[in-house]
Image (cartoon, rainbow, N blue to C red):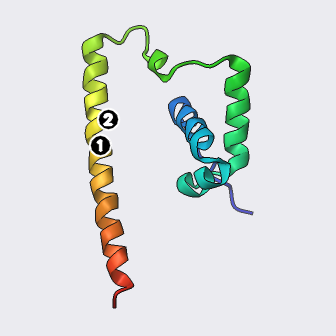
Amino acid sequence: MGVRNARKYTDDFKHRAVELAAEIGFSPAEQKLGIPNGNIRNWRDKINKLGKVSRTDTKSPNESTEDQLRRLQRENSELKKANMILKAAAAFFSQDHLK
């Protein structure tokens, strides 16, 4: 038997997934993220047990404001690039049905 590659998700990703599921529902979130809604429910339960922690509190104690700003700007840039790629892919695939 082959070895299963377990995906690792950051705590920030888990918080965002739980928030998304709360906003749009578990099944749409499962389809959008490609994560079984059982995982999202488990994350939600774990977050609720530990108490709600704001994602803004995830800054490491040694990270200065300038470092955090640089990190967030880098992350923002990466997300903008990913959005551009996804928009281009969506446009490409939407053209496919016209043929």
Which residue is drawn at the image coordinates 31% and 19% (left, top)? 68
Residue 6 rendering spot, x and y as whole percentages: 63, 47
Q: With 12 as the anchor, is 85 left or right in this view?
A: left
Up/down of 81 relative to 2, above or below: above
Residue 56 visible somewhere in the drawing: yes
Q: Secondary structure at mark 1?
A: helix
Quadrant of the image for the N terminus? Answer: bottom right
The numbered disc on residue 78 is 1
Which residue is drawn at the image coordinates 52% and 19% (left, top)? 54
Residue at the bottom extreme of this rendering: 99
Residue 16 rendering spot, x and y as whole percentages: 53, 36
Which residue is drawn at the image coordinates 28% and 65% (left, top)? 88
Q: Secondary structure at mark 2?
A: helix
Closer to us: 22 or 1: 22
Quadrant of the image for the C terminus? Answer: bottom left
Q: With 34 as the anchor, is 70 left or right in this view?
A: left
